[in-house]
């Protein structure tokens, strides 16, 4: 019945008019780019927030221009108060984790490239896709609004632990309207993510073109599929948790607040709740969330390494198996965020084991990447540099996880800069490197122009050095006992560490400045970059068989037929060293 | 290729399932008034509810007549997630125990 | 089975030079043999089921830890809740009839059954709101009640409120589908997909009813 295809993908005519083409677009490519720029906006704001907190830590008396206008109470005379420090830190974390790392790698690049890579015209549900984006956008608006409400963003961190987050403004600024807006923003974000996730899964399952069996899908597609499954299952729990938190704050329920709580000498009218319950629900989501942030990067890196090493991915099936195991195990480890929370120590032991086990598939994947590159004929494009850099920063950051996975060590390291260094290396660096690599790689396809490789390489080298300067020292700070989420370090034992903090802050500002090169390169090249060919990287996946940028229905009405795997590089194919996935079967004739 | 499976539950099956569900509901209500310890009552009611849910999923939602792969995709993932969530009850019973100590 | 050449799906009908057995998973076909919308709704249901489970687990967690959880539901409340259960189960059966009729192309019948299902949902909502008003009149709030830990009211209103919201959305959804199917803008697949949602809502009640009502029935 022809209705399968027509109901799976509405054969819509090409959109007319600016609004239909670029604003309320059904085209997955436009939506992917919209998500990408939503993430760019969020990362810019998030980065500025990180500068503010870092500057405050080492130069607390410096008046920051313009800040008093934003918040008279939070930054009187431009000097950040300790509470406002926590507010800015909260917003930084929330923006980065949700609106950067959970959007661009998956909804940004995934929306853009997945349908083309599987030979489809669009996602399975284009209208739902558009709805997902605008829902996410609404979530961002709610979150950014916290900057402009009277008491500012909440001070409870991106983790919003009750009772602090549940008792309202008795406990501090930002915990009234700010916390409500936070909860609403995240709940809205959950809905957008859920809708996106089911779109990704149905598309990958149902809309692959003929010959695109599961084991012929590029690893990017596998990564996006697994991430979508994780999203589908885990955001559901966060949504429930946010609803309960909002009720605790506004309806007087006590899911998370125990009886007899005195806050600023006021007895809170709650009884019967458990703060640990929030932690369980939050981290049940929170751990799969960090894999949602990194797994798309695994896919992109695998794809790019193979392309620019001119060698098939080593152990494709093993990598698929590892990604699946990581996804599976990610639901079994959340308690490692709660080792010192008062959770049952037996649970702690039970969580520690899968946490250590999950390092195995991650290590195997890292080794397979090295094996992919080893013996290859490397082409050091900027995308490749970031992909190689990803291996380095991911392994570095991941090693820190091995320490934290052990409850005995975590007793000392929890809540210190060791944790901050660890998660920034894996999420704030590695996942971002994945995004950079994806940008440099797919930019020609998205915008029909090339980015400037020279600027790209300068961007890479200074960023790579910069992020190590910022986040490696944090591990040592943590080992020395430097707590996190402190607005200032007044204890005596912390004084010798202040020069390290200064070094970090300077490195952060410098690395931040280097990103201006990237933004300049990005925006300039969109309009003025040299025109891109159909397949500038000589890559094999289906998106490189269509014009740059592709027509609105990707394949111009044709349905590609795939006869090859995704990584046939290093072959002798009539002068080329690669075979495209949709090349006729039987090529290359000589092998 | 098969689109809609032509095999579908007949009227008789659907109405039997319906009566079964109503009957099970009545059983549950009667059981509720037996003086059983809370946990035992909970376990029995859960078993009955899971059975009712299975009937609805299999016959009303048609899962019994779909490809087995659909069942394998959806249900084990759900059960796994729910199973993992039960780990949180360790802390609930600790809380209960600690509260009984200070009572 | 379709054989139009440019439509995905005719895998078995095409001659392939390889002798490998083509599976549904080789691309160009629907591996689960169901329309994409149906798969999409199943996935939504799994996710929504997890959300409900999280809320129910939160209730269980707090109830297990609470020494003073009340059991206040009189026989009349239990009877009311049982009637609500019957209403919802019956509306589910009627929904099956609607899907069956639509698959046979009987538009009028299907629309009629759809409206009957929606009516069942409305009846459920009315009984539920009546019950809520009764409890509120007795002093039950999300933050207190006359019988025991304040969490009783919180858990009760949250779980049943979340469920009632889903029922209400379901009623609106069914009415839209009925109108759309009647106007031939929507297909039998859309009817079936709405049926899946409705059965899911019924399914959740199969758990809420014993966990919320029966476990808090006032024993003689």
Image: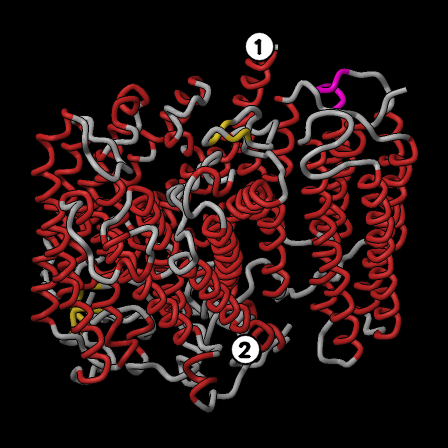
Locate residue C128, reporting x and y percent.
82, 47
Q: Determine the image quadrant of residue A405.
A: top left
Along the line of sight, the residue nearer the viewer: A103 or A120: A103
Q: Residues within 10 Å of mark 1 (few under 14, many from 20)?
A: few
Q: Is residue A431 magenta?
A: no
User: Callout 1: helix, strand or loop?
Assistant: helix
Residue at the bottom extreme? A16
Residue span colored magenta: B37-41
Spatial CA span between label 2 and label 1: 70 Å
Q: Residue at x 13, y 59 (%)?
A: A385
Question: Mainly helix, strand or loop, the magenta region?
Answer: helix
The structure residue drawn at horizontal position 78% and vertical position 75%, both measured from the top left corner, is C179
Chain letter of disc 2 in the image: C
Residue A61 relative to residue C57: left or right: left
The residue tagged 1 is B102
Q: Image height check: is A374 above or below B38?
A: below
């Amino acid at each position: 019945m022809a209705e399968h295809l027509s109901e799976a993908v509405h054969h819509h005519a090409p959109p007319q008019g600016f609004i239909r083409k670029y604003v309320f677009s059904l085209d997955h490519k436009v939506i992917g780019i919209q998500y990408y720029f939503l993430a760019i906006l969020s990362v810019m704001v998030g980065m500025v927030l990180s500068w503010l907190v870092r500057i405050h830590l080492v130069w607390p008396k410096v008046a920051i221009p313009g800040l008093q206008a934003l918040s008279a109470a939070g930054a009187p005379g431009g000097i950040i108060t300790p509470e406002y420090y926590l507010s800015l830190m909260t917003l930084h974390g929330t923006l980065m984790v949700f609106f950067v790392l959970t959007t661009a790698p998956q909804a940004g690049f995934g929306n853009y490239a997945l349908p083309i890579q599987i030979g489809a015209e669009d996602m399975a549900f284009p209208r739902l896709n558009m709805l997902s984006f605008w829902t996410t956008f609404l979530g961002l608006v709610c979150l950014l609004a916290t900057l402009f409400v009277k008491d500012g963003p909440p001070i409870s961190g991106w983790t919003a632990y009750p009772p602090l987050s549940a008792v309202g403004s008795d406990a501090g600024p930002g915990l009234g309207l700010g916390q409500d807006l936070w909860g609403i923003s995240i709940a809205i974000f959950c809905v957008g993510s859920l809708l996106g996730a089911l779109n990704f899964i149905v598309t990958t399952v149902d809309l692959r073109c003929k010959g695109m069996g599961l084991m012929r899908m590029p690893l990017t597609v596998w990564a996006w599929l697994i991430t979508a499954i994780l999203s589908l299952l885990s955001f559901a729990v966060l949504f429930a948790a946010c609803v309960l938190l909002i009720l605790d704050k506004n309806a007087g329920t006590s899911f998370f607040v125990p009886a007899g709580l005195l806050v600023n000498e006021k007895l809170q009218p709650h009884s019967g709740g458990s703060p640990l319950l929030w932690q369980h629900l939050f981290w049940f989501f929170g751990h799969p969330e960090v894999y949602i942030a990194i797994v798309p990067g695994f896919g992109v890196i695998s794809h790019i390494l193979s392309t620019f090493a001119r060698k098939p991915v080593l152990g494709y099936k093993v990598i698929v198996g590892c990604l699946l195991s990581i996804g599976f195990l990610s639901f079994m480890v959340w308690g490692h965020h709660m080792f010192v929370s008062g959770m049952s120590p037996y649970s702690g032991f039970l969580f520690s084991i899968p946490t250590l086990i999950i390092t195995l598939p991650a290590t195997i994947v890292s080794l397979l990447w090295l094996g992919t590159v080893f013996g290859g004929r490397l082409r050091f494009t900027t995308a490749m540099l970031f992909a190689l850099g990803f291996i380095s920063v991911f392994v570095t950051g991941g090693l820190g996880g091995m320490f934290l996975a052990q409850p005995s060590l975590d007793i000392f390291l929890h809540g210190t800069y060791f944790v901050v260094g660890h998660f920034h290396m894996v999420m704030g660096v590695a996942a971002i490197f994945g995004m950079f690599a994806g940008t440099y790689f797919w930019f020609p396809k998205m915008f029909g122009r090339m980015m400037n490789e020279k600027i790209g390489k300068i961007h890479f080298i200074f960023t790579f050095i910069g992020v190590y300067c910022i986040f490696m020292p944090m591990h040592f700070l943590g080992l020395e006992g430097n707590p996190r989420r402190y607005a200032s370090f007044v204890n005596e034992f912390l004084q010798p560490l202040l020069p390290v903090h200064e070094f970090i802050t300077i490195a952060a500002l410098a690395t931040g400045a280097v990103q201006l090169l990237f933004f300049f390169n990005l925006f300039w090249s969109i309009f003025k970059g040299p025109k891109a060919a159909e397949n500038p990287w000589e890559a094999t996946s289906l998106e490189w068989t269509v014009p740059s940028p592709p027509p609105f229905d990707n394949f111009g009405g044709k349905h590609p037929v795939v006869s090859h795997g995704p990584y046939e590089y290093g072959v002798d194919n009539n002068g080329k060293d690669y075979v495209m996935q949709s090349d006729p079967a039987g090529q290359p004739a000589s092998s | 290729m098969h689109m809609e499976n032509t095999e579908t539950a007949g009227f008789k099956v659907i109405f039997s399932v319906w009566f079964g569900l109503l009957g099970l509901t009545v059983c549950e209500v009667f059981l509720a008034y037996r003086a059983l310890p809370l946990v035992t009552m909970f376990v029995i009611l859960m078993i009955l509810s899971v059975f009712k849910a299975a009937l609805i999923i299999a016959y009303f939602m048609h899962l019994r007549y779909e490809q087995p792969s659909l069942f394998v995709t959806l249900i084990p993932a759900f059960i796994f997630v729910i199973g993992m969530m039960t780990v949180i009850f360790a802390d609930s019973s600790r809380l209960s125990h600690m509260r009984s100590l200070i009572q | 089975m379709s054989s139009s050449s440019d439509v995905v799906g005719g895998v078995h009908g095409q001659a392939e030079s390889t002798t490998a057995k083509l599976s549904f998973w080789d691309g160009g076909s629907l591996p689960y043999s169901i329309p994409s919308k149906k798969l999409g709704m199943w996935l939504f249901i799994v996710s929504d089921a997890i959300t409900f489970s999280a809320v129910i687990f939160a209730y269980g967690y707090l109830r297990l830890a609470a020494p003073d959880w009340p059991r206040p539901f009189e026989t009349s409340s239990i009877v009311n809740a049982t009637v609500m259960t019957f209403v919802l189960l019956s509306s589910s059966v009627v929904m099956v009839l609607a899907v069956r009729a639509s698959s046979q192309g009987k538009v009028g019948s299907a629309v009629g059954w759809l409206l009957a299902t929606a009516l069942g949902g409305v009846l459920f909502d009315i009984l539920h709101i009546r019950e809520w008003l009764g409890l509120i009149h007795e002093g039950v709030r999300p933050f207190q009640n006359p019988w025991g830990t304040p969490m009783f009211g919180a858990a009760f209103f949250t779980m049943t409120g979340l469920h009632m919201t889903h029922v209400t959305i379901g009623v609106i959804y069914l009415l839209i589908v009925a109108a759309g199917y009647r106007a031939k803008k929507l297909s039998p697949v859309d009817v079936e997909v709405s049926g899946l949602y409705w059965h899911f809502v019924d399914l959740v009640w199969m758990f809420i009813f014993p966990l919320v009502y029966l476990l808090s029935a006032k024993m003689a």
